[in-house]
Amino acid sequence: MKYLIGSILISLLLFANNFNNNQFQSSDFQNWQKQYGYYNTEFERQYREMIYNQNKKLIQEHNSKQNITYRMQENQFMTLTHEEFVGIYLQETEVSIPEITILNQDFYQPLQAVDWRNYTTIYNQGSCAAGWAFSVGSSIEAWFYIRGGGQNISVSVQQLIDCEKNSSGCSGGINTQAMLYALQDGLYNSQNYPYVGTQLACKATKSGTYFINNYTFVGGSTQSLQSSLQNYPASVGLDATYWQFYSSGLFSNCSENVVNHYALAIGFDSNNNWVVQNSFGSAWGENGIIKLPPNNTCGILNQAYQIY
């Protein structure tokens, strides 16, 4: 019965969409499908077009405001509701935020701006909520390149998803658990253990090639994270609840007390804004990057760890 009711509600929504959203050209949705893929049934296509039009209106209304600090744009998430985006791309695993006192940046002399984006690779996690694994994998790759004499490596994120048993694969994980795995077991090259975007049985039968020495907490204050970023990037836990359509600018529509995603802090600018590399592909954000205002925006100082 609940499925019948659900179908009726969706049918009513589709009717309302066709009646009220004629201001958007169907060709817009067709162009989006050409880039991101088509839907198999006419019912699904109409339902996703309805959501596309709703999101298009949301983006236009946001960008038309005068006092915004960031802009939105169309991307691969246009046919997802907000709830679907959170449920698919952000992790379900609860992360306990450590009891720390966040120190205000006004008490110290700011350090020189740094940006490591030319030493990292933008990845796309797809519909697997494995930001935790990409964050750590990318931090290891950057560490080998920057501190290892220019070693250009590609570690297996899929190995972390399949084999790190203290995490939950595509449902989420914790950066420190992934770092501990790399410390104890080592990671394979991604060519030998490629990414498939879903959790499978662990295929690692021996120790990997790439190990780290250890890892350490580098959050708690702006000065601590900035000082660590002078050396190379760091893995950070963040609240990405409303990152769905971020395009450019300074994003602060988030909580300091939530961790539902992990990314790679790659630097900060002369105004102390954080520069963060995400794992939603290069078409998202500023070529795969989001900028956050100073201090503990989106909880960036709560779960910041760096390998060595």
Image (cartoon, rainbow, N blue to C red):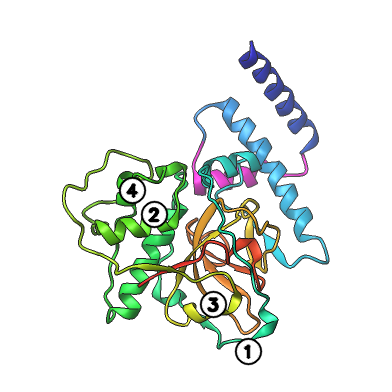
- Most foreground residue, 284 or 169: 169
Q: Give the extent of the magenta segment.
A: 22-38
Label 3 vs 4, first from the N-terminus: 4
- Most foreground residue, 266 or 102: 102
Q: CA distance from mark 1 to mark 3?
A: 12 Å
Q: CA distance from mark 1 to mark 2?
A: 33 Å
Residue 23 sits inside the magenta stretch: yes
Above or below, 228 relative to 186? below
The residue that mark 4 highlights is 164
Residue displayed at 53% across by 26% down: 41
Quadrant (top left/top right/bottom left/bottom right) for the N terminus: top right
SS category of the residue bearing label 4:
loop
Q: In the picture, residue 136 is in which quadrant?
A: bottom left
Check residue 109 in the rendering and tell me which mark sits there, or answer none: 1
Check residue 224 in the rendering and tell me which mark sits there, or answer none: 3
Residue 56 sits inside the magenta stretch: no
Q: Residue furthest top?
A: 1
Q: Are the two marked residues, 3 and 2, in contact with CB atoms closer than 8 angstroms?
A: no
The residue that mark 2 highlights is 177
- Most foreground residue, 50 or 194: 194
SS category of the residue bearing label 2:
helix
Q: Amino acid at mark 1?
A: Gln
Task: Return the x and y of residue 191 as percentages of the image width and height.
Answer: 24, 56
Q: Residue furthest right?
A: 66
SS category of the residue bearing label 3:
helix
> Is residue 49 visible from the viewing direction of this image?
yes
SS category of the residue bearing label 1:
loop
